[in-house]
Image: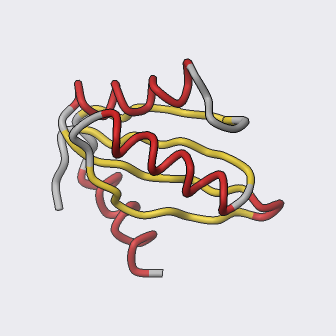
């Protein structure tokens, strides 16, 4: 599925991933896309939607974090290659 933007938030631990996902879904009109886990217990949450909604959702956990946030980013107008990467994460 094509989104106007992807929001990415990295946290440590699955429980924190759920908390961050919940906060972003409640903050703006975004959709949960997928998550990817990395070594060391890091969880990377992907949200999708229009640029303003994704930005608001990411900023909500960045500016008032419900748990420690390792890193966050908004990718507006993602390239087809980025869409393919996210789809690869979804299929894992």
The residue located at (28%, 32%) in the rendering is 76
Residue 25 visible somewhere in the drawing:
yes
The residue located at (46%, 26%) in the rendering is 60
The residue located at (29%, 56%) in the rendering is 83
Image quadrant holding the N terminus, namely bottom left
The residue located at (44%, 31%) in the rendering is 58
Q: Is residue 65 depicted above or below 85 in this figure?
A: above
Pinpoint residue 35: horizontal percent, then vertical percent.
50, 62
Q: Is residue 47 depicted above or below 60 in this figure?
A: below
Residue 70 visible somewhere in the drawing:
no
Residue 10 vs residue 64, the one in the foreground: 64
Pinpoint residue 27: horizontal percent, then vertical percent.
34, 34
Pinpoint residue 4: horizontal percent, then vertical percent.
18, 39
Q: Is 73 positioned to the left or the right of 80 in the image?
A: right
The residue lying furthest to the top in this view is 63
Q: Quadrant of residue 90?
A: bottom left
Q: How many marks?
A: 0
Q: Is residue 32 depicted above or below 77 in this figure?
A: below
The residue lying furthest to the right in this view is 40
Q: Quadrant of residue 41?
A: bottom right
The residue lying furthest to the bottom in this view is 92
Pinpoint residue 36: horizontal percent, then vertical percent.
56, 64
Visual colour scheme: secondary structure
């Amino acid at each position: 599925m094509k989104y106007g933007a992807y929001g990415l938030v990295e946290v440590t631990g699955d429980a924190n991933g759920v908390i961050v996902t919940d906060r972003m879904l409640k903050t703006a009109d975004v959709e949960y896309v997928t998550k990817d886990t990395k070594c060391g217990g890091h969880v990377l949450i992907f949200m999708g939607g229009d640029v303003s909604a994704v930005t608001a959702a990411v900023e909500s956990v960045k500016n008032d974090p419900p748990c420690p946030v390792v890193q966050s980013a908004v990718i507006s107008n993602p390239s087809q290659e980025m869409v393919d990467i996210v789809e690869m994460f979804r299929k894992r």
